[in-house]
Image (cartoon, rainbow, N blue to C red):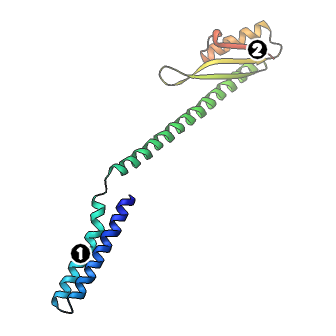
Amino acid sequence: MIEMVRQMIVSVTAAAVFSTVMLLIVQKSALHEVIRLATGMLMILALLLPLSRLTLPSFSRAFAAERAQAERQTEEAKQKNEQIAYSSIGGAVSQYIEKQAGELGIKCTVRTEMEQGTDGTWVIGRVRIRGKGLTGVQRQQLAALVEKECGVPPARQDLVEG
């Protein structure tokens, strides 16, 4: 790029010197106007010729780098969106289970862990239920509730005292 600018400066300077010499040689006459036109075209040519040698790979490399950065940002945004969806779905399921448990007279807190299923959708991977003084019957009710309402088998449920 710097080489191209240097070449442009040199060629424009050479064209300007040549134009000046030619215009000084030819005094005011009809040929003077033709020389002015020709030297003007020479100046334009001196400006454009270095640009014609500019290669596109530098632009394509810059474009490829920008595209790669845009793809990285898109992937990061997608992951953030998935994380938000994960939190929202898990929170909504936890609140629902807590509400249903409350209707059964069981006070507890619920935390759900979400996983991506084989088809790419979010599914409940594990449910952690924490309650104080849960009786065996209440534990069975909670396990049955989570299995019935959320489809999570008892093997993926953690009932913790506290």
- In the rendering, which numbered label is found on residue 41? 1
When asked about the image quadrant of residue 102, the answer is top right
Residue type highlighted by circle 1: Met
The structure residue drawn at horizontal position 72% and vertical position 8%, both measured from the top left corner, is 140
Q: How many marks?
A: 2
| Image position, residue 13 (x, y; %) | 32, 74
The structure residue drawn at horizontal position 23% and vertical position 75%, both measured from the top left corner, is 41
Front residue of this view, candidates 97 and 155? 155
Q: Element under label 2?
A: strand
Residue furthest toward the right?
A: 133
| Image position, residue 111 (x, y; %) | 69, 23
| Image position, residue 89 (x, y; %) | 61, 28
Q: Element under label 1?
A: helix
The structure residue drawn at horizontal position 40% and vertical position 44%, both measured from the top left corner, is 64
Label 1 vs label 2: CA separation? Answer: 88 Å
Front residue of this view, candidates 137 and 85? 85
Q: Is residue 49 above or below residue 67?
A: below
Name the image quarter holding the N terminus: bottom left
Classed neighbour count for the residue bearing mark 1: other residues with Cα under 10 Å, few (<14), some (14–19), many (≥20): few
Residue type highlighted by circle 2: Val
When asked about the image quadrant of residue 148, the answer is top right
- In this orientation, does residue 11 appear? yes
Mark 2, residue position: 160
Q: Is residue 82 above or below residue 46?
A: above
The structure residue drawn at horizontal position 31% and vertical position 57%, both measured from the top left corner, is 54
